[in-house]
Image: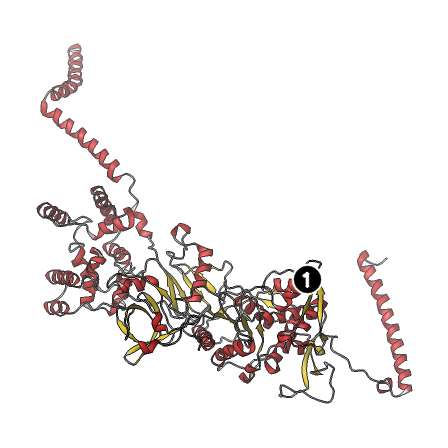
Amino acid sequence: MAATDDSSVKFRIRREIDGFPGMVARAWGRWWVKALAVLALLAAIGAAVFWFVFAAGLPSVDTLRTYEPPLPTNVRGIDGTPIHSYARERRVELSYDEYPPLLVRAFLAAEDKTFFEHHGVDYLGIANAAFTNLTTKRRAAGASTITQQVAKNLLIGNEVSYTRKVKEAILAYRIEDTLTKQQILELYLNQIALGRNAFGVAAASYAYFGKDLNQLDLAQMAYLAILPKGPSNYDPVRHTQRALDRRAYVLREMLKNGFITQPQHDAANAEPLGTVPRQTPKTETAGTGYFVEEVRRQLLDKFGEDQRAGPYSVYSGGLWVRTSLDSKIQDYAQAALREGLLRFDSGRGWSGPLGHADFDGLAWQSALLNTNIGLDYADWRAAIVIARDEGGANLGFADGSTGTLPRWGAQMPVRGVGGTAFAALKPGDVIAVAPEGGSFVLRSVPKISGAFVVEEPQTGRVLAMQGGFDFRIQAFNRATQALRQPGSTIKPIVYAAALEGGMTPASLIVDGPFCVFQGARLGQKCFRNFGNVGGSGSHTMRWGVEQSRNLMTVRAAATTGMPRVVSLMDRIGIGKYPPYLSFALGAGETTVSRMVNAYAILANQGRSHPSTLIDFVQDRHGKVVFPDNWRACDRCNAPDWNGKPMPRPVSGGKQIVDAMSAYQMVHIAEGVIQRGTATVLRDLDRPIFGKTGTNTGPTDVWFIGGTPQMIGGLYIGYDTPHSLGGYAQGGTIAAPIFKTFALKAYEGLDKIPFRAPAGIRMVRIDRITGKPVFGAWPSDDPKASVIWEAFKPESEPRRAVRRDMILPDPAAAAAAAAAKAKAAQEAQQQRETRRDSDFLQREGGIY
């Protein structure tokens, strides 16, 4: 019985084992099983091929969580006012909540009505587009959802192919799984290209309507919503009707989807497009071109141009730049320089066209725009000559408007050629005109040019920079790029070196013939005063500076030693020059910016702060990324005093010039204003120092100077140096320009005297002889014979006196001698005691 049971169990097990393979074998014998297996294999192969062709290598959608679109660099002035932006893509990044709901609905109606219903791909839309493409000969219709457009624009590019469409769909699914609908719309509305160099809806709102988003009406929102299909297709000027038809479609879709009411639809549909002409971005302030261009150069050197250079690039990093530009000071400097240039240039005839642009037919507007020539002076405008006949010329302007220049409005002679300006005009000439009556008259942009820089001496911050008449027509920045000979404005630096070398303001220097032998090849060089004025004997250093005597300057430089002089010029930032005496008279080339900074160092008691235009730079998240060692000033922005000491930023800076020598030089240069070559500034009635300059030719005239609050400097001259005329001098041309600036810039400022450093001794001296004066006091009269002069300790002049005036009593003399002997004995004992003490201290104790 047991054997029977055992065999039955083994049989059952064997049957079960043998039965599974047999069952498989029997199933495989059926044709439909083989067909299913082949289909499964083909499906697996197809899935693998699909993966490798479409899905493999697709970018991760996780990058969209931290996606940062290219943003412009925004530049602000000293008070935080926006003044400019650097961008290749104009974009303003907003959060989803900042977009008006009606605007969002307009874009949904135009681009993706079922956006909140699908999961990235609209299959019904794809089917409709496919049917339309097969049954019509029109341009192929697309069916991309907003999510697919985000994938295309931000992840895979704009290649036209079915492969790209499939990749779009895959990424759209992934994006919908990663981001919310609101986050997707935010990305879309911030990055979509809408024409006129506007990327994102906020930038397009200003580009097309000159308004912020919250100021748009329904019709304007609907117009912006048609632009993603192709901004150039719906240009408001060239394709007005096409734009109106497409806008009407968007409004109908909004009505059909319940986004707006019928009255809203009808009112919006009846409106004209209402767009504005192309315009300068609102953050670009007129008159700041030279300053912001110099800022751009410095930012490019520091951070690079685009995203390849790093996260802080100028054109895509979204930097926030706080500069030192004071808009009011900039306006005053610009106006003063322009008025001076026009005043000098007046009466010399028409300087010629600003440029020339050939055009065909009616294409004059685009030809004018392509020249990028503009004017922001007074009511002047840049115009292109469209045609000319005997009675006048037809003009065209950048905004598309036209005007007339009558013959009588262009009768000034052509400079250096003769004949009238009207006869010289040709179609295509770009000229400067100003309105007069119902027409326009010709204006002449001066050929003479120059530069003006204003700096804060305590910090080195540049408050204003004007590098020419107008940046749009003269982009070359003469403030930082034009190397010119500074003439006599170099003399305070020469005399500062002499003061450091031991001279005093009362040192007598001979104003007489001075010649040096320069070697066998160059022979003997004899110097002379300006205007060939002869020598006048010995005078004080002060008189030599005030009267700008060349012979005294080279003699002081020779006495001090030219190596010492050019060393100071190098340290103070003017330039590196060989030790030749001609450089003491301004033969070396430098820039206005360097000279202003050098004078600022003198005004700051010899302490140097390099000229800076940028206070600090923040990234798009607010982190300060420049300068590297930037530190915030704690409590500097406190609303009120908290009873504690006032917070003060660390001054820093490097001592370049001895503080007392620097003050002595400033004090001497105040005399240039009171009775020297810049007396035109005396009636400003405030402490001010400075120096005029006129170089050989003269080809340039200069003035550098200012107050403890602001130092300014300018030169004017032709870009290709040639004579300004024998009458031209710094005191008659440059100093009056500075005065025009100073009358407005210093208005309301406290009259602060230049502060003397510790150790300076103010001594009454005779202004002519330099000898000390007793019994008389200085007065307010600039020509007074007695003045206060600044001396270093133990360097002031002494008055000689008779012995009996000092010790009239012999008994007193004997007592004084005894007291002196006793004092000497006590001093000797103290020295001996000190020596013993020092010895014991060195040896470590008492022996």
- Return the residue nearer the eye: 373 or 660: 373
Left or right for 817, reference 296: right
Q: In this view, does 569 lie above or below 13?
A: below
Instruction: Give the number of marks.
Output: 1
> For the point 71% across and 68% down, which residue is it?
515
Q: In this view, does 89 lie above or below 727?
A: above
SS label for mark 1: helix
> For the point 73% across and 85% down, which residue is it?
773
Q: Tell me which corner region of the image, top left, top right, bottom left or bottom right, holds residue 95.
A: bottom left
Spot occupied by residue 318 in the image (x, y as percentages of width and height): 37, 59
Q: Is residue 516 visible?
A: yes
Left or right for 212, reference 87: left
Position of the N terminus, as image quadrant, is: top left
Spot occupied by residue 386 in the image (x, y as percentages of width and height): 28, 67
Position of the C terminus, as image quadrant, is: bottom right
Left or right for 329, reference 239: right
- Return the residue nearer the eye: 128 or 4: 128
Mark 1 burial class by Cα count in 10 Å: few <14, some 14-19, many 20+: some
Kind of residue at badge 1: Pro
Q: In this view, does 109 lie above or below 734?
A: above
Spot occupied by residue 173 in the image (x, y as percentages of width and height): 22, 46
Q: Can residue 707 be seen in this view?
A: no
Q: Name the residue under label 1.
A: 563
Q: Tell me, what colour scheme is on the image?
A: secondary structure
- Return the residue nearer the eye: 318 or 777: 777
Left or right for 173, reference 90: left
> For the point 59% across and 62% down, which residue is it?
575
